[in-house]
Image (cartoon, rainbow, N blue to C red):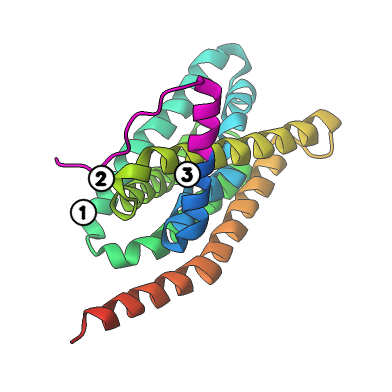
Amino acid sequence: IPQTTAKKTEGNVLKIAHADVMQGWRHIRAAPQIRRISLAKAAWGLGGGASVYMLALLGEQLSPDRQAAAIGLLFAARGIGTGIGPVMGRVFFKNRNKWPALLGVSIIISGIFYGLVGSMPLTYLIAIPVMIAHAAGGLNWVFSTVMLQYRTEDEFRGRVFSTEWLFVLVADSFSILAASLILQSGLMNLQNTVLVFGIIQVITGLIWLKSVVPAERATQSENNSKRTP
């Protein structure tokens, strides 16, 4: 596939890396349609990062005598959901104009089902809502990646994705640190903490629908008006 890419820069590796990151950041700031979607995975991670971290802790409490098996089951459920979500989403949501709203809905669905994990009795049945939560999370991940690929020019695509990954790492790290501090301090027990971070995801998804989706619709209307003779 023909691509327009920048020439390879020669010089100090650290300086080149810093320059590339700054160029990617400037490009994201200058392009709202890219900036909005570049935050989709991080928005999921604000609550989801801690939830994934707590899966191992849930497995330990789920079966003290068979901790490895219990943890493996929960992470298997996570993996199955992550695989199913994007495939099903692609089957039922072919209109890409609806994808920005779907990103927010996916965050809300993840939060609801992780909230269910934190609310229901601690049995192996929690694997089911874990799977559904990560089906929504997988859809968020894949659909936002595809949208960024389409929206970003060839020359900046690598830098934009690197900057997006930085957003994800920051969101996940903040989320995991917050959950760790809550649990370490004894402020809440494990399941209540899972519930709280599920609620955080729901709130984040609602904020996405309230802020990002109207901006996306305005951009779509503007683009449609430009195409109209």
Where in the figure is residue 221, as x and y percent of width and height? Answer: 34, 79
Where in the figure is residue 106, as x and y percent of width and height? Answer: 44, 54
Q: Which residue is mark 3?
A: 24
Is residue 176 positioned above or below 147 on the image?
A: above
Is residue 1 positioned above or below 97 on the image?
A: above
Q: Secondary structure at mark 3?
A: helix
Of residues 138 and 80, which is closer to you in this image? Answer: 138
Instruction: Rate crowding at label 1 as few (under 14), some (14 to 19) or many (20 or more) other CA atoms within 10 Å.
Output: few
User: CA gap, disc 2 to disc 1?
Assistant: 6 Å
Give whichever of discs 3 and 1 has the lower sequence position. Answer: 3
Is residue 204 positioned above or below 176 on the image?
A: below
Of residues 30 and 183, which is closer to you in this image? Answer: 30
Of residues 127 and 159, which is closer to you in this image? Answer: 159
Q: Which residue is mark 1?
A: 91
Q: Secondary structure at mark 1?
A: helix
Instruction: Rate crowding at label 2 as few (under 14), some (14 to 19) or many (20 or more) other CA atoms within 10 Å.
Output: some
Q: Which residues are magenta?
A: 1-21
Give whichever of discs 3 and 2 has the lower sequence position. Answer: 3
User: CA gap, disc 3 to disc 2?
Assistant: 30 Å
User: CA gap, disc 3 to disc 1?
Assistant: 32 Å
Look at discs 3 and 2 and give the one toward the viewer: 3
| Magenta-colored stretch includes residue 74 | no
Q: Amino acid at mark 2?
A: Val
Is residue 33 positioned above or below 77 on the image?
A: below
Most extreme residue toward the bottom, as rendered? 229
Answer whether labels 3 and 2 touch (C-beta < 8 Å). Answer: no
Q: Which residue is painted at 85% across and 32% down in the image?
A: 185
Q: Which residue is painted at 42% across and 45% down in the image?
A: 132
Q: Which residue is mark 2?
A: 87
| Magenta-colored stretch includes residue 15 | yes
Q: Which residue is painted at 71% across and 41% down in the image?
A: 193
